[in-house]
Image (cartoon, rainbow, N blue to C red):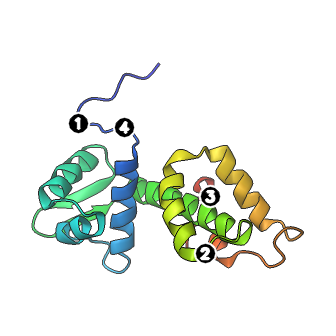
Amino acid sequence: MPPPPSPVDPPQTESVDDYVKAIYELSPMTKMARTSEIAGRLHVAMASVTGMAHRLAERGLLDHLPYHGVRLTPSGERLALRVLWRHRVIKMYLMRLLHCPWAVAEAEAEHLEHAVSDELVNRMAATLADPAIVPQRCSGLSHAVAPPDAV
């Protein structure tokens, strides 16, 4: 049985997922995200971003370069891609099969990406990829973000 996480080792939480996803989305070209950008994206104080950046760096999910920003490590990037993949599968499922408008599907996916099991997300993805159910393959799933086991 693994030891319990230490106080500086945040468990896999919605907050951790949101931070790595925000950093990934804010740093497509330079691979660096500034703390002010992260704070704005997540609507939190810069001190909160700095504190979480230190904790995520201790976990090996990002490199924190004071006065320059943060950069995801390969482990952090894998986690961000997993969260993004889950989000996109859920959003596309809601839009394609339940006919939710984009804004509703986006908002619901933000919540559900943290709540539903991997098994359910995989079943949603399989349903979307089945041409008998959705005639055209969902290009938003196969490009840009791969399923978590493919990364």
The residue labelled by disc 3 is 150
Distance between the alpha carbons at the discs numbered 1 and 3: 29 Å
Determine which of the numbered discs, if any, sits on residue 95 in the image.
Answer: none
Considering only order in the chain, which callout, 2 or 3, is on the residue closer to the N terminus? 2
According to the picture, the residue beneath numbered tag 1 turns out to be 8
Secondary structure of the residue carrying tag 4 is loop
User: Is residue 73 at least partly visible in the picture?
Assistant: no
Residue visible at 28% across and 49% down? Answer: 56
The reply to whether dot 4 and dot 2 touch (C-beta < 8 Å) is no
The residue type indicated by label 1 comes to Val
In the rendered structure, which disc, 4 or 2, sits on the residue that comes first in sequence?
4
Q: Residues within 10 Å of mark 1 (few under 14, many from 20)?
A: few
Q: Which residue is mark 2?
A: 101
Of the residues tagged 3 and 2, which is closer to the observer?
2
**Going 31% across and 39% down the picture, which residue do you hit?**
10
Sequence-wise, the earlier of marks 4 and 3 is 4
Per the image, the residue denoted by label 4 is 11
Q: Secondary structure at mark 3?
A: helix
Secondary element type, mark 1: loop
Q: Nearer the viewer, mark 1 or mark 3?
A: 1
The picture places residue 124, in percent across and down from the top left corner, at 71, 57
